[in-house]
Structures are given as C-alpha cells and as structure tokens.
Amino acid sequence: SAVISQKPSRDICQRGTSLTIQCQVDSQVTMMFWYRQQPGQSLTLIATANQGSEATYESGFVIDKFPISRPNLTFSTLTVSNMSPEDSSIYLCSAVGSQTWGDTQYFGPGTRLTVL
Amino acid sequence: AQSVAQPEDQVNVAEGNPLTVKCTYSVSGNPYLFWYVQYPNRGLQFLLKYITGDNLVKGSYGFEAEFNKSQTSFHLKKPSALVSDSALYFCAVRGMDSNYQLIWGAGTKLIIKP
C-alpha cells in the first residue's frame, strides 16, 4: 500500500496567521487532492493539486485563501491563509495513479488544525 | 448528477454477528466503487474496490462488498463482527469520465458491542 506523510500532524494557531501543510508521497503519482473534514463527518474536496500548474479549486474554495503548490510528482503543500476559527478542521491530502496503486486513492494521516 | 447515499448514520451490531453497511449510488456509465474506513483520530484507510468483474469483492480485515447493478448498491459486509471493527465507514464512487475524483457518502458509524 501507499505511504503518504503529512506535516504537521496537528497545530494550534492564532487567527489571522497562516499555516502551510506538507504532503509527501513515497512514489510518483498522477493526481493529488486536498480535503477538509470535520470530525465524524464526510470529506469535502478543496482542490486538485496539479503538477506544474495552478490547482483546480472546488466551489466555495479560492486560491487566495487556500494556495496550493505541487512542484513535482511526489509533493504538495496547502496553505490555510488568514485563518479564522471557522478554519478549524482536519485537512487530508490524498494521491492516486501511481504504478502500484492504479485507481485507488490513498490518504495521508491528516493535519488537525485548531484556530483560536 | 453523481451521488452516493449511505442511508444509516449509525449501525449497531453485537460482536460475532454479521454486519452490513449500506451504500447506493448514482453515476453515469459504469461506476468505480470504493469503501474506506476511518478509525478515531486516524486518516482514511482503503478497504476494497469494485472496478469490473466478479460482483463480490473481498478486501482487507475480512470485509467484502457486493456490487448490484440493478439496485445500484454496493453494500459492505462481514460475516462475524469484531469490537475492533468499530469505526466510521465511507462509501465513494467515481464515474468513468471523472478525473480520479471521488464522490463521497456521508459516512456510517459502525459500533460493535461486546
């Protein structure tokens, strides 16, 4: 199976600041995604991280608030900018399309963010 | 529009009994169907998937799921539940023309009582 790591695993931040979450995959993948999840609830897709080009954002999410980078086929970052308490959530990265995984999407362990 | 429904917010089963977690879907074309499990304070773990072939799919931890095209269902099953199976279970679907994106169900909390 896949190995996807995320840093940090959790953080407590002050409102108005920004946090960058890193996602590292142990093999080259076709697609990487960023999700948000409230505890006990379903996943909401924030954006698709495209290698070498701008991310594709879902309705309700904008680049100024959630800038995403994907400089290569194994790494991506999500920044949560100008944070407010409403941004408190679990942020998950996922990846799909490696030679080993095929169509299966695998997930990192998540970053639990609390904004005070 | 593509969608996934998990009609039960919570399922309670006694240890040793069979369990079923229900999932129905709506997607254009042939679906790719997935089940994931999320243990408390953990990320999502892949359990099994149906792409094509045999309608009964076997996955991790003794789970299996049956694809039923006429009923557009993909229910998750296990013959004998363990207390350690208690977790949040998500069904997801991908249409053949989507860019690997998954449509997610709301999740079902499975509680196995000793």
Image: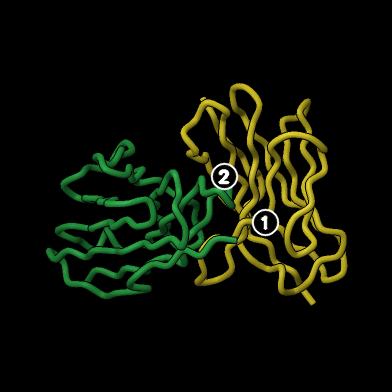
Give the CA distance from mark 2 to mark 1: 15 Å
Quarter the C terminus of chain A occupies: bottom left
| Side of B54 where B26 appears, left or right | left
- Quadrant hosting residue B112: bottom right
| Side of A105 where B48 appears, left or right | right
Quarter the N terminus of chain A occupies: bottom right
- Dot placed on the residue nearer the N-terminal end, 2 or 1: 1
Q: Position of residue A81 (x, y in %)?
A: 17, 57
Looking at the colours in the rendered structure, which chain would you say is drawn in green?
A
Q: What amino acid does circle 1 point to?
A: Leu
Q: Position of residue A15 (x, y in %)?
A: 16, 66
Q: Position of residue B36 (x, y in %)?
A: 61, 55
Depicted A82 relative to depicted A5: above or below: above
Q: In this figure, which residue is indicated by the disc labeled 2?
A: B105
Depicted A93 relative to depicted B1: above or below: below
Element on which disc 2 rests: loop
Looking at the colours in the rendered structure, which chain would you say is drawn in yellow?
B
Element on which disc 1 rests: strand
| Side of B114 where A98 appears, left or right | left
Q: In this figure, which residue is indicated by the disc labeled 1?
A: B47
Residue for point 69% across, 51% down: B48
